[in-house]
Image: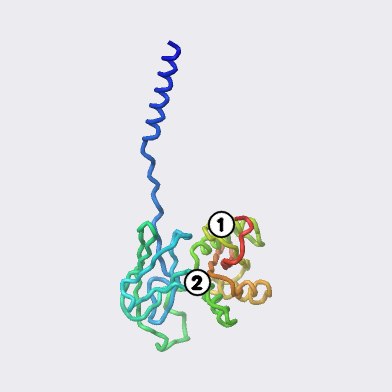
Amino acid sequence: MKNSLNRFTAALACAVLTIGLTLPAQAVEAPPIRVSSYKGNTLEVGERSGLIIGPSGVEYTVTSSDPDTAAVEQVMGFWVAVAKAEGSVEITAVNHAGESGTLTLTIGPDTPSAPVTTDGPSPTEKPDVRQELIRLINQTRRANDVAELPVSEALLTAAQSLSDRHYTWHHTKEECEAVIDSGYPYGFGVNLTVFTGVATEDAAQHALENWLNSPGHFETMIKPDCDSIGVGVTESGGVTYCYMLVGRPNTHNPYE
């Protein structure tokens, strides 16, 4: 009787285990693939713009629906759109699983020769402060014979999360963790500046000047061993907080 009871108990446990193993697993929805151009969805003929593709940390194949209008190139592991002729194209990024995201780019005429007026405010919308700050940093790098840096979505996210914390001095552990959480897998260089009494449209220039006037910050801006850049700018209560992160693939994040 005891043996029969043991056999019955074992059979019941096996049945329960079998049922448990055959329950369908909950499907985990993959995050959508995001594709954007750092200079916006409209470029001029001859202009180049880094493509920001997320989620970061994934390899993508990127193509243009019309390479004669806008081609795509890979520079130091990052994708760049190159505007060649007027028209409209679709830029598509595909991961190894076949999932894709698309960006529509419109290419307008090259306009440097258009007449420029200096009296009165510009009729165009003010550029994003972060975009302008990255432009100025890359301009500084070019002037010092160092290659421009493409924008990294991961570092852009990390830098913005740090500036949003209103830090007025470096918090090394938190900075390292923000970069890890963003998905950037290597070490990095970091600049921080905080100031008051500066109009929004002048914030990028003011941040750059602060870094130019500090030897350590200047050296970080023009390091040649960097592969990408991200900046964060937050204005709160009349105070502007600016972070710059440059990826350095030959170094290690100490909190990784």
Which of 144/124 is in front? 144
Residue found at the far front of this picture: 3
Amino acid type at circle 1 is Ile
Question: Residue 92 lies in what quarter of the image?
Answer: bottom left
Task: Where is residue 177? Give x, y as percent.
Answer: 59, 55
Question: Residue 89 lies in what quarter of the image?
Answer: bottom left
Q: Is residue 206 visible?
A: no
Task: Where is residue 54? Give x, y as percent.
Answer: 44, 61
Tell me which residue sits at (48%, 70%) in the image: 128
Instruction: Look at the picture and state if 139 lies above or below 3.
Output: below
Amino acid type at circle 2 is Met
Residue found at the far right of this picture: 215
Asked if the residues shown at circle 1 and circle 2 are in contact, with their CB atoms under 8 angstroms apart, the answer is: no
Q: Is residue 108 visible?
A: yes
Q: Earlier in the sequence, mark 1 or mark 2?
A: 2
Query: Residue tagged by mark 2?
Result: 76
| Foreground: disc 1 or disc 2 | 2
Calculate the distance from the C-alpha at mark 1 to the C-alpha at mark 2: 20 Å
Q: In which quadrant is the C terminus drawn?
A: bottom right
Mark 2 residue crowding within 10 angstroms, few (<14) / some (14–19) / many (20+): few
Q: In which quadrant is the N terminus drawn?
A: top left
Task: Where is residue 197? Give x, y as percent.
Answer: 61, 70
Q: How many marks?
A: 2
Instruction: Look at the picture and state if 17 lies above or below 149.
Output: above
Secondary structure of residue under mark 2: loop
Q: Is residue 109 left or right of residue 152?
A: left
Secondary structure of residue under mark 1: helix
Mark 1 residue crowding within 10 angstroms, few (<14) / some (14–19) / many (20+): some
Task: Where is residue 10? Give x, y as percent.
Answer: 43, 22
Tell me which residue sits at (64%, 58%) in the image: 254
Query: Residue tagged by mark 1?
Result: 180
Which of 177/109 is in front? 177
